[in-house]
Amino acid sequence: MSTPGNYQAISDAERGVNPPVPWADGCLDFFSDCEVCLWGCCPLGCYQSLFAWNATDAGTEDFHPALLRVCGLTVVVPNLLGFVASTAPSLGPAVQPLSTANQLLFAWYGMTHRQKMRRRHNIKGTDCGLCSCFSCLCEGDDEKIEDFCLYLCCAPCATCQETRHLRRWGITTRWRPKYPYDANGRVAGIGGGSYQAPPGQAMDVPVAPVAPGK
């Protein structure tokens, strides 16, 4: 297995001829990187920063716009609706649909970011099963369906998985690369390493210039 030190964003033309890569690990592999897990578990500030860092490092969105959007959808709007419901119980029936709509909007926003990350870094495949109840919203695309359901049901799981993938392959400016592969395809580096190379995956995708924001 070759060293994937040049795994970077690729162009649309190259995406058709280079084999896709899977996620670095499963969305439920929380303890494969406890540092990332702790950041993702904090719902006020840390998780939102983690999402915005991912968007910046993956090249899907600038940090501050992403941070403002995710804070609005996960902190400001839910707390505002909760405050209205607690101070004016008569408005409760109207608040609940708005809360549900906000959750769906955040899931759609998270899915859009994750889909851009998949295309930019040639990430394919699903690992959490298929949520077919939303197939009508996602054009029957298994990856879209999974990405939407992940952000709807467990957004921190999806965000931490993205961070681990970016960190594992060194596509990050906020985290020190963790457990990179050595020349023999074995995990090397910090702490002896708990990551294992996916079987049969070389993951040496060529570098290609990609314009910012695409």
Image: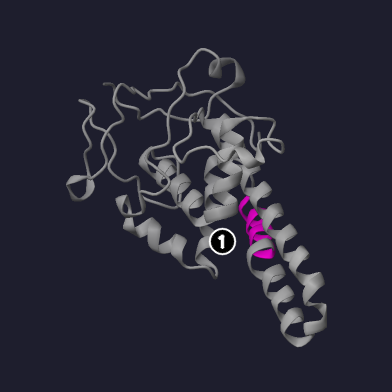
Left or right of 214: which side holds 121? left
In which quadrant will I find the N terminus?
top left
Name which residue type carries label 1.
Gln
**Residue at left offset 33%, top offset 22%:** 202
Q: Quadrant of residue 131?
A: top right
Colour setup of the view: one colour
Q: Nearer the viewer, residue 9 or 148?
A: 148
Q: Nearer the viewer, residue 96 or 193?
A: 96
Q: Is residue 6 above or below residue 85?
A: above
Q: Nearer the viewer, residue 61 or 81?
A: 81
Q: Position of residue 92 (x, y in %)?
A: 77, 76
Q: Position of residue 125 (x, y in %)?
A: 48, 30
The span shown in magenta is 62-72
Q: Position of residue 106 (x, y in %)?
A: 67, 54
Left or right of 69: which side holds 98? right
In which quadrant will I find the C terminus?
top right
**Residue at left offset 46%, top offset 60%:** 40
**Residue at left offset 51%, top offset 12%:** 17
Name of the residue lying farthest toward the left: 192
Q: Is residue 34 magenta?
A: no
Q: Nearer the viewer, residue 105 or 185?
A: 105
Label 1 sits on residue? 48
Magenta stretch, main secondary structure, is: helix
